Image (cartoon, helix red, strand yellow):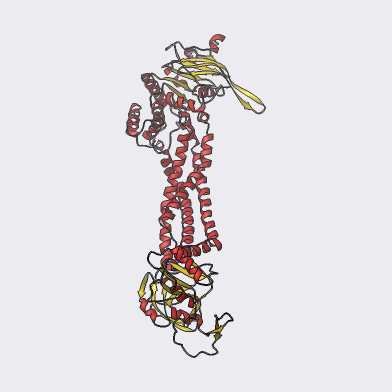
Amino acid sequence: MASIARKNLLEDIPRFLVAQAGIMFAVTLITIQTGILEGFTRSTALVVDNSKADILVSSNQVVNFELTLPIPAALLEEARAVPGVEIAEPLLLGSARWTKPGTADIVPMRPIGFYPDGQLFRLWNLTAGDIDRLKDPYTAIVDESSLDTLNAEGVGDTGQMNSLPATIVGLTQGTQSTASSTFAFMSIESAKAYATVGLTSSVRCRSNPDGELDCSTVYRTEDSETGVPPVKPLAIGDAITHILIKAEPGQDLEALTQRLETVLPEVRVMTREEMAEMTRSYWKSRTGVGFILGLGAGLGVIVGVAIVGQILYSSVSDRLKEYGTLKAMGASDWTLYRIVIEQALWMSVLGYMPGMALCLGVSVWAEASMGVTILITPVTAIGVLGITVAMCVGSAFFAIAKVTRVDPAAVFRS
Amino acid sequence: MIIVSPLEPETARFPMDTSSDAQGAIVAKGVEMSFPAGNQDIQVLKGIDLSIAKGSVQLLMGPSGSGKTTLLTILAGLLTPTAGQVELLGHEITQMSRRKLSRFRLQNIGFIFQGFNLFPALTAAENIEVALNLKDIHGNSARRQALELLGEVGLKDRADLRPSSLSGGQKQRVAIARALAGKPPLIVADEPTAALDSHSGHATIELLRRLAKEGGATVLIVTHDPRILDVADRILYLEDGEIVSEDKAAISH
């Protein structure tokens, strides 16, 4: 049929543009909110996702990748001894405060210590500097998006972390979690130094009646600063956060996980995917973030339905005589519904395209300027298209109800 | 002023058109129509009996409120009478389902409206194509037929203009072309000349008569317009819900 729907839609351009602006707004709201949620939750598990470990060993009280209790570094050797483990490397998450000389700003930091030469955690998306420089004490690599926050210019810039010096020796891109303090990737030795600065520790062991050793780590605050201390290698009495495990080829990960949990005391052992999912799920479900962003997306749908519904209803109301004429001529109700639904479909597609283009632009800008990931995957894009179409067609309900009530005999009375 | 001569009661109740085909294209028997108005019903049509021969042009005239538009609406299958029967082309339509009746109208009746009722967003040709599309004629075939019909009403060169770019007479010619799309055997027209000047009005009705005759269609026109009396084969004059005259000569005088 000559497209009455399309032509009716374009006949009143100002009204059409208002409708499209409304749909664009709804599409943008839904996509951005969903994209922020997706980007946010993905970013919380970036470090896990990008590690090469098959399995992570953490405290048995682990809540998510960053929210956990320390475990003794001594477990590292025990883990290496478990049959099926090929490589075991430590990961140390600390907390620190960054200050830039000459400025009063204090920035919370999340030092992430690993073996720069290790195999299970390799920094990704390095855009400047050199990972080998992390072998120098008190050096760190940060995400490009954190430079402004740190009041830093780039590679070579210096500051202080927990009263110790820190030099930026490299930059990465897309490695920062939106939910976390600023990540500072560094050697495990530097991370340990920042974590324990101002503290000294010693291990005290004594023999219990069963003939076993009971050991405990004792931390003691240093009374005075004695200059910049040299970094020290990881010791048996140190605390670490996770152990990254690479299984020997052909190993059944589930069986290895169970063996590790049996052998190592008070730990929880998870595959990389399980840890990542646990972390994402925590941020999405157990914090209000998922709800709030979901609410925003829902609001977008409501706004879209209201706008499209109103526009379609008024469009049908203005054209009752035309619909009545079609009915008088013998058009079936379905023919009329098709016109309204086709109009709704055109509105959804024509509103979706610029809306999605706007979202893609905003996501690129947000990533580049703020380091905030608005993740718009093909699945998200297709999903939002589906929602938009459903929203527009659904909002045609009242217009369809009105068309159904049109009395064809009225064409002779008007 | 139209003067109606008194009719014999029998004739007034059931005017038979014997001018053409013995089989009536439209046959109404005892058609009554009432509308509720407050606590009581107002009877608009009071037992209309009529028969309209195939291929004829018939005018339905009468003063405002006489019930002629209501009668036209019933005879076109758009309104179900309170009582009585209507046969169109041999089919009793008052008992038809809504869906079946829509289908019947689509296949058999062309409509022409006082206000043209063209789709403003569509061009002249597209307005006709819509009617053809409803009858399952699509694509190039619909386009070709639409242009042919526009050619018949002398508007082929206006095919791509929207109604807003056409004069009143041209719009009504497009409406006639649309009504003729698919060659329906019945054409009903409601005040087709009311919005037209004298010249356009007469030309429009002449055109309608010629095309209807060529296609063998029966045409029923509701009108107040005395300028078009001469194109009719018969004039039915309605007053207070009853046909009081079917005599063209009497009404003309």
Q: Is residue A59 above or below residue B127?
A: below
Question: Residue most toward the front?
Answer: A210
Question: Residue most toward the right?
Answer: B39
Residue B112 point in image, percent of width and height = 44, 27
Q: Is residue B32 above or below residue B135?
A: above
Q: In which quadrant of the rendered image does the N terminus of chain A lie?
A: top left
Q: Is residue B142 left or right of residue A95?
A: left
Residue ID at (48%, 70%): A57
Residue A393 point in image, percent of width and height = 48, 44
The quadrant in which residue B163 appears is: top left
Q: Is residue A381 above or below residue B241?
A: below
| Closer to us: A291 or A149 | A291
| Closer to us: A178 or B171 | A178
Query: Can residue A333 be seen in the rendering of this structure?
Result: yes
Q: How many circles with numbers are drawn on the protein? A: 0
Residue A172 point in image, percent of width and height = 39, 71
| Closer to us: B201 or B38 | B38
Residue A59 point in image, percent of width and height = 52, 71
Query: Can residue B3 be seen in the rendering of this structure?
Result: no
